[in-house]
Image (tube, helix red, strand yellow):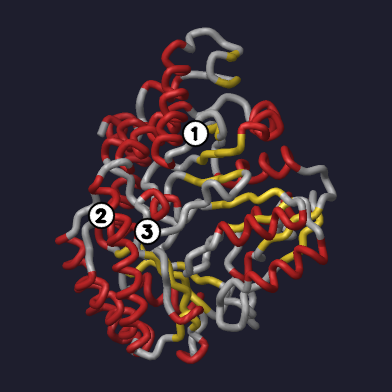
Amino acid sequence: MFVEKTDPQIARLIKKETKRHQETLNLIASENYPSKAVREALSSIFVAKYAEGRPYKRYYGGQEFIDKLEVLVEERVRKVFKLNPKKWTVNVQPYSGSPANYAVLRGLLKTGDKILSLPLSHGGHLTHGAPVSLSGQDFKVVNYFLNKEGFLDYGEIEKLAKKEKPKLIICGFSAYPRKIDFKKFSQIAKKVGAYLLTDTSHITGLIIGKVHPTPFPWADVVMTTTHKTLRGPRGAIIICKKELEEKIFKKVFPGLQGGPHEHTICAIGVALKEAMSAQFKKYASQIIKNAKILAEELEKYGFNLISGGTDNHLLLVDLTNKNITGKEAQILLEKAGIVTNKNTIPYDPRPAFDPSGIRLGTPAVTTRGMKEKEMKKIAFWINEVISNPKSIPKIKQEVKKLCKKFPIP
């Protein structure tokens, strides 16, 4: 690495972080490993260019290849989702999912307008109207909730929508382990005259791989990050109906940000091309298979899973019957080389910083090539760590051995 010569201190941190990933199991549902090609594109010369404005409508000179790049990546978005360019328009400029969601809200709504969304505590997202987020401070937020079994209740959501008459409904979540019926959400939105925003950040790779229903044509706007199941860099994409383009895109630039990160857009383009391959579809299918096996095995060890299992890439574990909190479990598991995140569960009596659950996801370990056999091992190790913390040193060594067999791309 060139950085070793110019900045040994940073180089050491890079090496340590690389080693951490190589020797641990990453079960964080929102993380993944992009390919070397994606990482190479991310460090390309496109990092050097200021490109304020939309393609062919820039403020600076030197944009010939920037414009071609952005148009190409937009075309790949439409191609991967099979979208008609006369009906759908694409913006690949948002820096991340949070500002992208906020741009959509500010584009379609007036401050004080009403939003209907799932709260963070039930598996929604911070930018879907949480009180600490600008999305929750600039708009009036009404929440729908999961039922006691951990499922979306579309009948109850419709009743609430008819009562509250929101201007916008949000679906697509960060900790919901089941498939989403976008058609039902669309029908509810149409009945009350609301826009439908689907945040597919977690499941976009699964949608492309045809192992989860698509939000098209049901949504008015689809927002997705690019670094989760899509396996791209950390960026975001907004896809909206053509008639909403002017309202939303002006909130991205100049409303919220200046020059887009063209090196990130370059890497998103590479990830999208990879996602069009037959190999990627196999990968998406394996994510689901791995999550289901992990869920089944954990249930055998007496773990309670919210909704009783999973249809997608993640599972949410209620640790109440194990007499341990989510925070405590996260710390113990990480000591054994199993990286997870503490997470609230629906109707959680505990606070968010020390909740009752943990969230587990299979995208990153699936990228490393692990399959059902390895999921069974991981479930065994999780149970051992939780039930017998003295086993941690032994399990840590076993985890390292497994990780050596499945290197990071």
Q: Nearer the viewer, residue 68 or 321?
A: 68
Q: Is residue 251 above or below residue 169?
A: above
Query: Residue 96 placed where, x, y %?
Result: 54, 42
Looking at the image, residue 135 sits to the left or right of residue 220; the answer is right
Q: Position of residue 70 (x, y in %)?
A: 46, 24
Tell me the kind of residue under disc 3.
Answer: Val
Residue at (31, 82) in percent of width and height: 297
Distance between the alpha carbons at the discs numbered 1 and 3: 22 Å
Q: Amino acid at mark 1?
A: Asn
Residue wearing tag 1: 84
Q: CA distance from mark 2 to mark 1?
A: 26 Å
Question: In terms of secondary structure, where does tag 2 sit?
Answer: helix
Horizontal arrangement in the rendering, residue 295 relative to residue 344 (left or right) = left
Q: Which mark is residue 282?
A: 2
SS assignment at label 3: loop
In this rendering, the label closer to the viewer, 1 or 3: 1
Which quarter of the figure has residue 119?
bottom right
Report if residue 173 is visible in the image: yes
Local packing at callout 1 (Cα closer than 10 Å; few below 14, some 14-19, many 20+) is few
Q: Quadrant of the N terminus?
A: top left
